[in-house]
């Protein structure tokens, strides 16, 4: 009895993960909102560049700031 | 044993919906479309048979698109009367964004609008901008993703070759 309940729960959990497949990521032509300035990790590119420069020159550290660009996967 | 087989079946079934869309590639027939211009005229790929078509997908929020426009204007001026048609499909959700873009970056070629995104989906566009060079019989000859500094030279060579062969 318990085994069959566990099995059913397992199946339910597995089937539920299939639902994640329907949450499609935005397609390349749908990234208009993601390209907006307020959607960037750092909305001020000049300031971010200066900060990055200080880290690079004073601390020898760089990178780890995700990918650059406007969300269209191109720039 | 049956348990494992049963679980495997469930897993395989669950993985089915994650198959991705099929992208249009060189040598294939370009999916047809009929889209409206800002003036309301319909532009269809079928009606451009016999002409070399440079099909471009663009959006107002895409930086390289802005850089590609002057070059496309130049191509239109150079090869427009020799059999080249440049069609730029705008994929902005709001047409007003595209209109603002076009005020700053005028286009001397055909611009059509596909806010629902059915045509980029049919081509399975992988990035913005994406362009497809289509020959006189409607087959894709070249696919270009993005617009880099070295893109124009190679593309113009391909356009010229198609115009010569026409």
Image: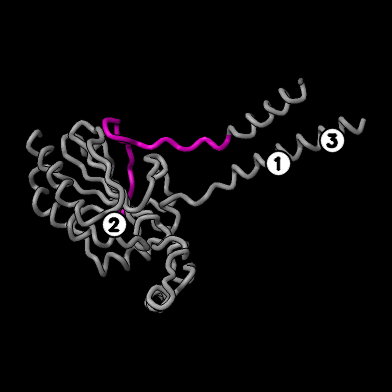
Q: How many marks?
A: 3
The percent coordinates of residue B162 (x first, y second) are 13, 37
Disc 1: which residue: A16
User: On the image, which quarter does residue A53 sit in?
Assistant: bottom left
Asked if the residues shown at circle 3 and circle 1 are in contact, with their CB atoms under 8 angstroms apart, the answer is no
Magenta span main SS: loop
Q: Nearer the viewer, mark 3 or mark 1?
A: 3
Could you say which disc has been placed on residue A6 in the image?
A: 3
Q: What separation in Å lies between label 3 and label 2 (alpha carbons)?
A: 62 Å
Q: Is residue A16 left or right of residue B92?
A: right
Q: Crowding near pointer 3: few (<14 within 10 Å), some, many (20+)? A: few
On screen, A14 above or below A27? above
Q: Residue at x 14, y 44 (%)?
A: B84
SS category of the residue bearing label 2 = loop
Name the quarter where the C terminus of chain A is drawn: bottom left
Q: Nearer the viewer, mark 3 or mark 2?
A: 3
Q: Crowding near pointer 1: few (<14 within 10 Å), some, many (20+)? A: few
The percent coordinates of residue B114 (x first, y second) are 38, 51
Instruction: Using the image, name the chain to which the residue with label 1 belongs.
Output: A
Q: Is residue A47 left or right of residue B135?
A: right
SS category of the residue bearing label 1 = helix
On screen, B104 above or below B28? below
Q: Nearer the viewer, mark 2 or mark 1?
A: 1
The percent coordinates of residue B51 (x first, y second) are 16, 38
């Amino acid at each position: 009895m318990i085994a069959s309940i566990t099995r059913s729960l397992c199946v339910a959990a597995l089937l539920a993960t299939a639902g994640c497949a329907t949450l499609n990521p935005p397609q390349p032509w749908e990234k208009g909102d993601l390209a907006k300035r307020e959607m960037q990790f750092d909305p001020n590119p000049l300031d971010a560049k200066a900060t990055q420069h200080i880290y690079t020159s004073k601390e020898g550290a760089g990178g780890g700031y995700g990918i650059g660009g406007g969300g269209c996967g191109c720039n | 044993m049956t348990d494992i087989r049963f679980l495997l079946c469930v897993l395989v079934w669950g993985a089915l919906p994650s198959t991705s869309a099929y992208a249009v590639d060189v040598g294939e027939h370009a999916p047809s479309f009929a889209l409206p211009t800002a003036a309301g005229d319909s532009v269809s790929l079928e009606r451009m048979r016999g002409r070399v078509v440079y099909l471009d997908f663009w959006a107002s929020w895409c930086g390289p698109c802005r850089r590609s426009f002057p070059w496309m204007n130049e191509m239109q001026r150079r090869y427009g009367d020799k059999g080249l048609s440049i069609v730029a499909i705008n994929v902005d959700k709001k047409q007003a964004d595209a209109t603002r873009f076009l005020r700053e970056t005028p286009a001397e070629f055909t611009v059509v609008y596909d806010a629902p995104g059915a045509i980029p989906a049919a081509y399975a566009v992988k990035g913005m901008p994406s362009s497809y060079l289509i020959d006189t019989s409607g087959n894709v000859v070249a696919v270009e993703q993005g617009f880099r500094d070295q893109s124009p030279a190679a593309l113009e060579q391909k356009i010229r070759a198609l115009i010569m062969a026409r």
